[in-house]
Amino acid sequence: MDIAILHYSLAPVVGGVERLIEDQARALRALGHCVCCVDSAAKFRAWLRRHPKARNAVSRPAVLIHNVLTMPFDLAWTRELTALTRQRPDVLWVNWVHDVCACNPAYRQVEWREPLPRALHVAVSRVRQREWASVSGLKPRQIQVIANGIDEARVLGLTARVAGMQLDRHDVVLLQPARLVARKNIELSVNVLAALRKQGIDAVVVVTAALDPHQQKSVAYLGRLQRLARRLGVHRSLLFAGQPQALSEDDVRSLYSVADGLFFPSLNEGFGLPLLEALAHRLPIFCANLKVHREVLGPLATHFNTSLKPERISARILQELACESLSSRRALLRRTFSMHRICREQLLPLLQCQSAPSSP
């Protein structure tokens, strides 16, 4: 689908709507659509000329108009767009309401008498839905609510390599910073991952290890882990992030930023530096019940016996994550306010099911 996104200004101008448009465009492009962001009437006319009116268009172009139809910053453009929504019914017009001039006391001096555009109406919250309904004459049910979302990778400043892993699309991300040696007990990570996924949790385990081709034991250990993951059906959810190229320090920091918890099931440690790194990143810590781990963190970590069944360990992890306010916030962000998910599950179905613009 060809999609134009309109607003008065675009990035690098700093503003909430500008950031949202940037994330929305990025998500729609990732979903396979052609997106053009436009910040003036002249640029939009040029875009529209490339989409001449067709009687039987197989795929209608869509225009997402953010705030221009409800705010007074360029009334000439507002009137031009309103007229176009009536002249070009072959285009799917979407009036995206972030703010409503007619309901804002700061704009009392503006005499708002603009006609209602012939478009789909989308509000970013129920509050804006009610406000737009009160001044437009529409019923609230005629105004779709699609909340704002964000691109978590952009907000966290993830490296391109970690952003490309798309970890924010999973329910639970467990990080195990470890080398490929048997005492790191990565087998338990694989089994706990399988137990989580059996419970319907979209979980991934990320292991930072880089393969040392000069250490045959390391190569053999990786092979055993991969075979175990395949046998348990979790090979696509077990990510050896250090393959085929070692991670940079920035990559590792990015992984800590996006993870939901540190999983550290080592059989033997002299200290366990990742415990402190996780603490610095304010991550919940799930670690083997070793004397040194209790010495380092005491009650600040969730300790478990590595001899426990993976199902019991996974249940403990889920229980602790449910109590962690940070994890609850991340879950809310990913399930409700992920821009990619919003575009895939709400916006695109809305656009694709429309055979004609809605009428006021």
Image (cartoon, rainbow, N blue to C red):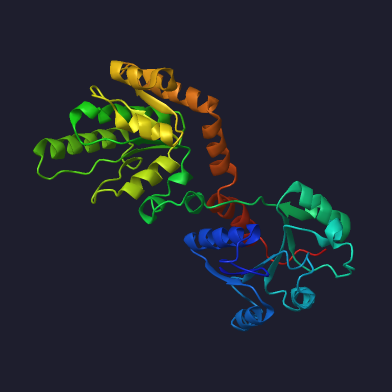
Percent x, y of residue 325: 56, 30
Please name whichever residue, 7 or 299, is drawn nearer the observer in this view of the structure. Answer: 299
Residue 176 picture quarter: top left
Asked if 155 appears above or below 227 in the picture, the reply is: below
Quadrant the N terminus occupies:
bottom right
Relative to 324, 277 lies left or right:
left
What is the number of callouts on the image? 0
Q: Residue 172 location in percent, x, y?
A: 45, 36
Counting from the top left corner in percent of width and height, residue 134 is at: 87, 54
- In the rendered structure, the answer to whether residue 323 lies left or right of residue 289 reads right
Front residue of 187/353: it is 187
**As drawn, 39 above or below 266:** below
Compared across the picture, whether 162 is left or right of 121 comes to: left
Q: Please tell me which residue lies in front, 262 or 357.
A: 262
| Quadrant into which the C terminus falls | bottom right
Give the side of residue 163 with respect to residue 39, left or right. left
Visible residue check, residue 288: no
Q: Residue at x 41, y 24 (%)?
A: 314
| Residue 239: image location, x then y, percent | 32, 42
Query: Residue at the location (24% across, 38% down)?
Result: 226
From this view, report whether residue 306 is shown above or below residue 115: above
Name the residue nearer the viewer: 26 or 10. 10
Q: Is residue 234 visible?
A: yes
**Residue at (38%, 32%) from the top-left corner?**
262
Q: Look at 54% across and 43% down and name the residue there.
A: 334
Q: Quadrant of residue 79?
A: bottom right
